[in-house]
Image: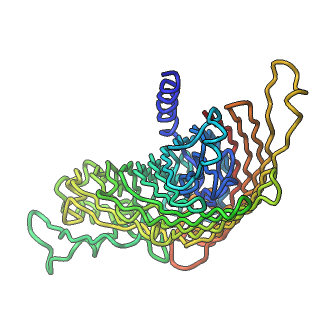
Amino acid sequence: MPQRSFLACFVVAFLALAGVALAANGPLLSTIGSKGPVDLPVDGDGWSMFRMPSSIGWNVDTEIDLDMFLFTSKTQLRNAVPGTDTGNNLSKEGATFGANGGVVVPLGRLNEDSSDEEWDTYSDAGKITFGFGIFVDMAGGTGGSTKVRYTTYPETIPQRAGIQFVAPTLVVAFTPTEWLSLGVGLHAIYGKVEIRSVVGGGSTPLNGSPQLNGTDFPGSPSYADFLSLFSNDNASDPTTYFKADLTAIQFSATLSASFRIGNRVGIGLSYRPRSWAPENLSGDGLVDSGRTFQQALGGLAPGLQSIFLSTLPNGGANGFAADYDIEMRSIYVPRQIRMSVVVWPVDRVVIGAEIAWIEWHRAFRRFNLSLKSGNNEDVNFVVGSNRIDTTLDQRWRNRWAFSLYTAIAVYQRDLEEIPTGVVVDNLTLRFGINYSDIAVNEDVSNNSPNAAFVTTNLNVGASLQMGMFTIHSMVEHGFYGSARSNDRPQSLTGKNTFYSATQWFYHFGLTVRF
């Protein structure tokens, strides 16, 4: 009963923590974790089973793992604002907190009270191991709003992008032989996306036809001849402000196989398809095209402005902002393929490597948005409908991630030498390095500071075992990285923008085995 109560408290506490997790969208979580992936692909734990379900196939003890982390970053953005004496020179620091946790339950294993005869006949073959965890699957963004200056918003306008995908995961591993483990992880993913941005692209048809006193103009021209509500061509900045808060449930699975070659070598392979969504991300949003109309009408004589406004049902009296029901398609957790190798050259040292391929291009290529039930009659009249269909280009790149890591068990002293009341079995030191390409496309970042321009992570950690409890700590540093956008067609201010970022993760973890 005490074990059940402990587990219930753990689950409740973790659910409270997971909702506020916001990690980095820099190098994918290849080295993250209070212990790192040093146990891959054998002797897995609550974190490694998320990426490689078969890693828990040889676990002997029931195990609970919790990893709490603090993420901090510093991002910069510099560019000129054409036609003005000012520009953007932004430097932003922020911090967010998150957590991951998992429970591993092996079936049919012997315990420390088993007899020597039972151990002599014991075999790992035919065993089943279950795991359950809640993990930050994909998260990142710019944190709080950043005030960015455009030619169309010289006074600055707040921008923000945030994404959180949290994945409750059920894992089953089976060992058909003593040297092979097969595993599957089933992920139910809660996704949340927050956007505050100026948008463009010229993809919104303006099919409404202006009328004067109920009569069409000669030739029935459309409003496209007067305005470009979502304009963003080679010579202008976007003028429409877009705000949305969207959520959805997606699903995914991870398949893996782990091989144990003797007692010194382990190999793991895992495959995860792109997530699938029975329903699109949906929620409420706001489109404010007030600056669009201001830009379009500002050059007209007052009389012509009055004539234009008189063609609208309410004459612009209610402004040009509209609330919409919004659906977003084409945003997924990317397909991933991983291969891990670990070697124990001696009992107290493990050396490992992992290579991963992540298909970001299909997962973050273009966001397709449908805005429905717009409540501004004037905007609906100009568009020709209370619905707008538009796109936000992302064009992320596929990436490779390479990791090297090692763990060294340092036995402090024999138990007989430990002072009374102090129980310390061993201390494990952990080191790792990770390199990956930049996935985010700086040419369409649209003046958003972003922590994703980091390519290299270094981590240092330690684990201290005290009986059934092990405490873990790790520090990860994402070294300074930068990129500069080109001068191909995009927002005018976004041309030749310099981006840079650094990252830090601070982990504290706890493992309980019984």
Q: How many marks?
A: 0
In this picture, residue 175 sits left or right of residue 374: right
Depth check, front residue: 29 or 426: 426
In this picture, residue 453 sits left or right of residue 359: right
Depth check, front residue: 289 or 487: 487
Q: How is the image coloured?
A: rainbow
The residue sitting at 37% across, 73% down in the picture is: 202
In this picture, residue 381 sits left or right of residue 124: left
Residue 152 percent across, percent down from the top left: 48, 62
In this picture, residue 497 sits left or right of residue 360: right
Residue 188 percent across, percent down from the top left: 40, 50
Residue 251 lies, with reference to residue 104, above or below; the image says below
Residue 422 lies, with reference to residue 313, above or below; the image says above
Question: Residue 156, can we see it?
Answer: no
Depth check, front residue: 87 or 425: 425
The residue sitting at 47% across, 28% down in the picture is: 8
Residue at the limit of the structure toward the left, as seen here: 214
Residue 123 percent across, percent down from the top left: 58, 52
The residue sitting at 34% across, 51% down in the picture is: 286
Q: Quadrant of residue 112?
A: top right
Depth check, front residue: 177 or 62: 177
Residue at the limit of the structure toward the top, as seen here: 420
Q: Where the C terminus falls, by quadrant?
A: top right
Question: Residue 14, can we see it?
Answer: yes
Residue 35 percent across, percent down from the top left: 69, 47
Q: Quadrant of residue 500?
A: bottom right
